[in-house]
Amino acid sequence: MKKIAIYPGTFDPITYGHVDVINKSLKLVDKIFVAISESNEKKCLFSVEERMAIVKEALYKDLKFKKNKINIISFNNLTTDICKKFKSNIILRGLRAVSDFEYEFQLAGMNRKLNNNIETIFLMSDVKNQIISSRLIKEIAELKGNINSFTSKSVIKALKKKYE
């Protein structure tokens, strides 16, 4: 039986921290659905369509991930509903620092209450990626700073275009 995981988030934009979680996840599961949230409390810089295009270009073109291992989807419902739709009982979540843990712990508990067959797997990004956040990358890009070590070429290009 294939192990399928859902990796939900806004990915506004995708960072090397996200990529790190994907790389580590591929050692544990057979297929990952990178699920890009349409409706979120966060105010996103990029539309969901833009984020999907950016993630596809970053993962498939820049970083050469295999399409048979990673699918990019969007969603506007519960993560547990996405799990059911794609026959997954695994939710992937990345942790950067202790400050992430409390929120992620509550989210995992709530998802477990909604569907007790679902397990949340927390993965730490490598130390070099733990400081990276989409919010900080956007801020640095807006101020014309160098973000080359935080994300892929296509993401950098999209950010530069957005802030022209």
Image: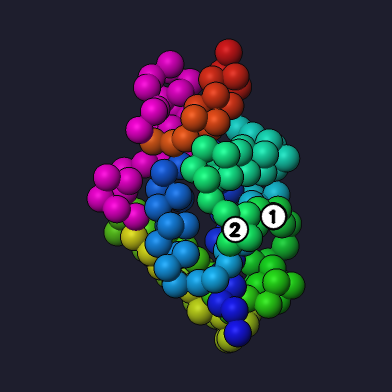
Give percent across and percent down for residue 48. Answer: 70, 42
- Residue at image x 49%, y 43%? 63
- Residue at image x 34%, y 60%? 124
Secondary element at tag 1: strand
Q: Nearer the viewer, mark 1 or mark 2?
A: 2
What number is the disc on residue 29? none
Q: Is residue 96 above or below residue 117?
A: above
Q: Is residue 81 above or below residue 35?
A: below
Q: Is residue 78 left or right of residue 98?
A: right
Q: Is residue 73 visible?
A: yes
Residue marked by disc 1: 73
On the image, which quarter does residue 3 sit in? Answer: bottom right
Residue at mark 1 to residue at mark 2: CA–CA distance = 10 Å
- Residue at image x 46%, y 23%? 141
Q: Is residue 55 visible?
A: no
Q: Is residue 102 above or below residue 164?
A: below
On whether residue 139 falls in the magenta region, the answer is yes
Residue marked by disc 2: 70
Sort mark 1 into few (<14), some (14-19) or many (20+) by Cα contacts within 10 Å: some
Secondary element at tag 2: strand
* Kind of residue at badge 2: Ile
Instruction: Give, as a single range, the part of the protein colored magenta.
Output: 125-149
